[in-house]
Image: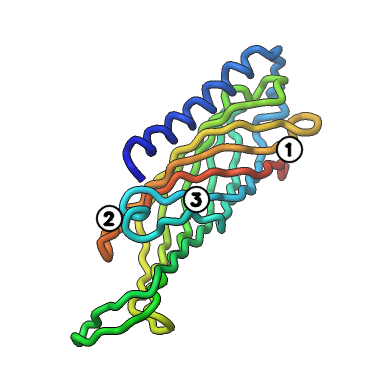
Amino acid sequence: MTSHIKKSLLLSISYLSLTAVIYAQTVEQVPTYSDTKGNVKVNLMYNYSMPMGALKDDVFNNNSPRGFNADVLYWFQPKWSIGGSFGFQDYYQKNPRQVYKLSDGSDISAVLSQSMQTIPVMVKAMYMPGAESSSIIKPYFSAGAGVNLVTFSEYLGEFSSLNNNAAKFTAQAGAGVKFALGKNDKAGILIGANYQYTPYNKYDIKSINSINLQAGVQFRLK
C-alpha cells in the first residue's frame, strides 16, 4: 500500500472521530456518574484487516476478513478505562504456479501458498469523552501495547518450506463511535478502526502492520 493510501486511511479515521465529537456536542449533556464509573465492560469485535507496508507489498495482497478482538476494560473514571485485549487474525495468499529453485539447487514447479496467524495480547486503554452524556452516539479513542504471537507458514505445493513462530512487540491506536443501547448505558454497538504496528524482520518482512476495520458490541458485566 502506498504512503498516499496510508495517509488517506488515517485521515478517514480522524475524520470519523471528529465528526462523532461534533455530533455528540450538539446533544444535551446529562451527567450520569453512577452509571459509568466503576463498571467492567466487555467489547466483542469482528475485525477486517488490511495489510500495509512490506506485509502488503511482499506477501499478502489480499485483505483478511477472518479476525476478531475481545477487550475486558475497567472504567475507573466515567471517561477512562484500562484492561486487557486479545485478538486473532488469519492471513492467506495463494500464488500462481511457477518454477522455484530449492536449496539443493534443483527446480520445482509448484503453487506457492503462504499463511500467517497473529494473536495480539495487549494492555489497552479507552477514552470516551461523551461517556456521561445522554447522547446515543459517543466517540471513543483507544491505545494498547503488548505482545503479538505470530505464526508464518509457506508451502510449495503440499510441502512445507517455512514454518516459524515468534513473539513480537506490538502497539495499536484506534478511534470510533459507540451507539448506546438500553437504559443507563448498559450496552452498545461499536464501530471503529485502528492501526496496528508489529516489527517482524524475518523472510524480508520488516513489519506486520495493518489498518483494521471493526464492528461489534459492548456490554456491562457489573
- At a point 72% along the width and 20% down the height, the residue shown is 134
Identify the mark nearer the N-term, 3 or 2. 3
Residue drawn at x 40%, y 59% is: 60
Q: Is residue 13 left or right of residue 30?
A: left
Residue at the extreme right? 183
Determine the residue positioned at 80% across, 33% down: 182
Q: Quadrant of residue 109?
A: bottom left
Q: Residues within 10 Å of mark 3 (few under 14, many from 20)?
A: many
Q: Which residue is mark 2?
A: 206
The residue under label 1 is which amino acid type? Ala
Query: Quick one: label 1 or label 2, which is nearer the N terminus?
Result: 1
User: Which of 206 and 130 lies nearest the eye of the viewer?
Assistant: 206
**Circle 1 or circle 2, nearest the eye:** 2
Q: Secondary structure at mark 1?
A: strand
Question: Neighbour class for label 2 at 10 Å: few (<14), some, many (≥20)?
Answer: some
Q: Position of residue 71 (x, y in %)?
A: 58, 47
Seen at 43% across and 42% down, the residue is 195
Residue bearing the label numbered 1: 187
Between the C-alphas of marks 3 and 2, the distance is 18 Å
> Which residue is labeled 3 in the image?
49
Q: Secondary structure at mark 2?
A: strand
Identify which residue, 72 or 209, lies in the foreground. Answer: 209
What amino acid is labelled 2 in the image? Lys
Q: Is residue 24 above or below residue 169?
A: above
Mark positioned earlier in the residue sequence (3 or 1): 3
* Quadrant housing the C terminus: top right
Position in image of residue 191 (x %, y %) = 61, 37
> Residue type at mark 3?
Ser
